[in-house]
Amino acid sequence: MGTRKVLVTGCSSGIGLAVAVRLAKDEAKRFKVVATMRDLEKRGPLEKAAGDALNKTLAIQKLDVCCEESIKACINSLPDRQVDVLVSNAGIGMIGPLECQSITAIKELFDVNLFGLVRLVKEVLPDMKQRQSGHIVVMSSVMGLQGLLFNDVYSASKFAVEGFCESLAVQAMKFHIKTTLVEPGPVITEFERKVYEDAENIDLSETDEETARIFRDIYLPYSKMVFTTLGQTPEEVAEQTHKVITAKEPPLRHQTNRLYMPMTALKHADPTGRLPLEAFYKMIFKHDRVFKATLGVLRMLHRRGGNK
C-alpha cells in the first residue's frame, strides 16, 4: 500500500493536534496528513509541534465542520479529492445542570459534534465507495457508551455519533470501507480545561438549590479527582489512534483508557440498566469513601503499569 492521505479535523489543539502530528511523524512514512481547523490564526501550536514534518508530510488547511461549503472547498483542493483516512475529531463540550443550558447552545453543540461528522462523511463517503477503500475514524467518547451525571447533552451527542457510525459501518463494509470509533475517557487538554472553567463560572440561578449544591460541591470536586487519577494526555490518545489506523483489521470500537473500562463494563453486565445506575448513584451520593478508595487503587495501578 502506498502513502495514505489523511484528513484530520479540529487540529488547533488537544487530541486533533496530537493525532495529526503523530501520523505525520509515522516512522514508516505511511501518511500524508491534511490537518484542518476552523480558524487558521490558531495554527501556531500545530506548526511548532509538527516541526520538520510541516509542509512535507503535514499540510494545514481551513475547514469548518459546520459549513458544507468549507468542507467541500477543502476536499476539492486535494488531488483527486482523495481521502484514504478521515479522522473526525472536531467537537465541543458542555457540562452542568440541564436547566442552566440554553436550547441555542445545545443546538450548537449538536451542530458540531453530530452534524459536523455527518457533513464530513457525506462529502467523503461517495469517493471512498468509488475507490472501494477507506477508513472513517471518529473521535467519540466513553460518554457515548455510558451517560454520566451533568453530562446529559454532551453524552447525548456522543450516543448519537455512536449510533450513526454503528449503522453506517454495515453499509461501509460492503464497499471495503472500515469504520472505527475511538473512545477516550478523561483527557487532559485545553478543551477540557475550558469546559471546566465554564462550568465553575456557570450561572446556577435557573436550577434549584439542591441541584446547584450537588453540581458545585460534589460533581466538580469528584470530576477533578477522576481527571487526576484516570486522565490521559492527548499524545497517549494519539498513539492509540495511530495503532487503530495502522491495524490490519481495525475494530469498530476502541477504548483508549484501560483504567476506565470497568465503568463502561457495568452497562453490559446488566441489560436492565439497574447495575450501572445504582452503582453510580451510590458512589456519588452514599459511599464517598469507597469512591475515593477506588480512585486511590486505580491511581496506584496507573503508576505501576502505565496507562496503555
Image (cartoon, rainbow, N blue to C red):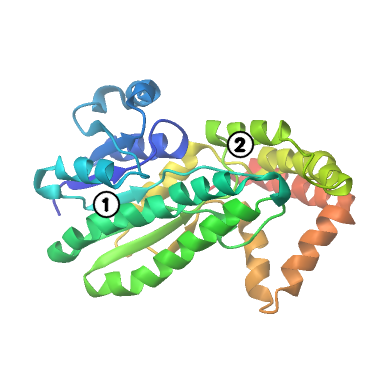
Q: How crowded is mark 2: few (under 14 residues within 10 Å), some or many (20 or more)?
A: some
Q: What mark, if any, has residue 192 been given in the picture? A: none
Residue holding disc 1: 85
User: Residue 217 is drawn in which quadrant?
Assistant: top right
Nearest to the observer: residue 232 or residue 121: 121
Nearest to the observer: residue 166 or residue 33: 166
Which residue does the image show at 23% across and 32% down from the upper left? 59
Q: In this view, does 90 lie to the left or right of 51?
A: right
Q: In which quarter of the image is the N terminus?
A: bottom left
Under circle 2, the secondary element is: helix
Which residue does the image show at 66% across and 79% down from the upper left? 271
Image coordinates for residue 304, horizontal then vertical, percent: 65, 43
- Can residue 258 be seen here? The reply is no
Q: Which of marks 1 and 2 is in front?
A: 2
The residue at the far left in this view is 80
Q: Is residue 164 left or right of residue 101?
A: left
Compare marks 1 and 2 and give the one earlier in the sequence: 1
Which residue does the image show at 79% across and 44% down from the upper left? 215
Residue holding disc 2: 195
Classify 36 as above or below 242.
Answer: above
Nearest to the observer: residue 225 or residue 141: 141
Image coordinates for residue 282, horizontal then vertical, percent: 84, 60
Image coordinates for residue 53, horizontal then vertical, percent: 25, 28
Q: Distance between the residues labelled 1 and 2?
A: 29 Å
Amino acid of disc 1: Val
Amino acid of disc 2: Val
- Can residue 134 be seen here? The reply is yes
Classify 52 as above or below 34.
Answer: above
